[in-house]
Image (cartoon, grey):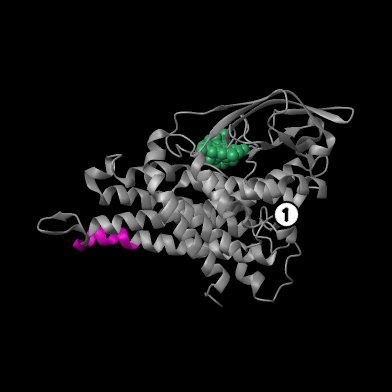
Amino acid sequence: MDFELNEEQREIWRWAKEFADKEIMPRVEENDKKAEFDWDLYKKIAAQGFFGAVLPEKYGGQGVDFIAYALMTEEIARACSSTRTLFSVQISLVELPILKFGTEDQKMKYLPKLATGEIIGCFGLTEPNAGSDAANQQTTAKQDGDYFILNGQKTWISNGSIANLAIVIAQADKSLGHKGICAFLVETDTPGFSARPIAPKLGLKSSDTSELFLDNVRVHKDQMLGKFGEGFKVAMYCLDQGRFSVAAGAVGVMQGCIDISKKYAMERQAFGQKIGEFQMIQQMVADMVADCEAGRFLVLRAAYLKSKGVRNTRETSLAKLFCAEGAHRAAHSAVQIFGGYGFSEEYPAARYFRDGRVLSLYEGTSQIHRLIIAQDELGIRPANGPGSPATTFDRLSGLYPEQPAPSMV
Ligand SMILES: Cc1cc2nc3c(=O)[nH]c(=O)nc-3n(C[C@H](O)[C@H](O)[C@H](O)COP(=O)(O)OP(=O)(O)OC[C@H]3O[C@@H](n4cnc5c(N)ncnc54)[C@H](O)[C@@H]3O)c2cc1C
């Protein structure tokens, strides 16, 4: 087993780390207080080419692998989870699904613009009555000649008010259940499309989160993403991608909590010594480091499988569950190490605590990931498809034929 990064991965990690420290960190507190999307920072990220990281060169991207993408995502989240959400949505929830399911025309039309940041994307699955139960879509798509007419409401959509392009999931034939669901590429200036920001929120204050309203939105059939009835599959693919980047972001939150806690613990004095010299503080630091490193390896394992084109729903779920919960533990400990100052918005622990809380809510709650993992383990529903060997080690040992599922990278 090889734990070394290659030169390109190291270089990208350094590049993202430097950008996070120089450009994101200095603004994060003010952006959190203002609770506004930072357009200037957005332009800087776009100018770096970050939004095109994973896309092939043909579509204006740089074609980095998923290990490098995970490390970039971690670094951005170490500095700011709102910015990380923007980055994750653009790449994992919008670009990669278009790359996977889009026609060549759709790819050429949208991917280069998404890669440069000329346009922003969002992904609209969740509805007021369809969250974890995502197949319960109430948004309808009624065919009218060459067009579909969309009606309904989406909620909790990241980038919703600032997006130029939305992937909208809608029910086109209720009699077919989830096989009647379709996905559409909807330009947000289409008549009948509107958005309203959700505020105030507990955290992610400088990330735009919005409701979407679709009132007789006419979309040409050429804007369907994937085939008729493939919308649920598209949505699950989006989540497979999104969960991975949320897991990587959670590692960044853990690392951020470690960084601020160790600095504070070696400065703050109590009873005539640094609090970092107390064993009970050391215990919290040790647990944070163990969670962070274990979580990072789970993310990198999922990244490795993704880059190899091996189906990884189980491994991504494990990474998402462990890292989200680990980020909660780390943020909780950071507040504890800061003592009363951890309760103050003047110190960064409170922001990590608020921002980190969402990690076990979106892209599948922790309960939903536990269901996926347990049902896989019990043989009730194999997460990586029927007949897949239970563990990653089984699959990578060479004793089993590799899963022919590059479609799920
Ligand atoms: C900041 C933010 C950004 C978001 N961005 C997006 C986005 O860009 N696009 C998008 O489509 N959505 C987005 N979401 C929505 C998010 O994915 C949903 O909130 C999430 O899927 C949970 O759905 P829900 O809120 O309806 O909760 P519910 O599904 O109603 O869940 C409520 C509780 O019940 C539990 N529960 C539900 N079903 C089960 C079960 N079978 N077994 C055990 N427990 C269960 C849940 O775990 C949870 O604890 C975002 C949410 C937030 C907060």
Q: Report if residue 360 is visible in the image.
A: no
On the rendering, which quadrant does ligand 1 occupy?
top right
- Label 1: how many Cα within 10 Å (few below 14, some 14–19, many 20+): some
The kind of residue on which mark 1 rests is Tyr
Residue 121 higher or lower than 144, as above or below: below
Nearer to the camera, 106 or 361 = 106
Residue 350, image x, y percentages: 33, 43
* Magenta segment includes 278: yes
Name the chief secondary structure element in magenta: helix
Q: Report if residue 330 is visible in the image.
A: yes
| Secondary structure type for disc 1 | helix
Nearer to the camera, 323 or 37 = 37
Residue 274 higher or lower than 159, as above or below: below
Q: Under 8 Å from ligand 1: the CB of mark 1?
A: no
Q: Give the range drawn in magenta.
A: 277-286
Residue 118, image x, y percentages: 64, 43
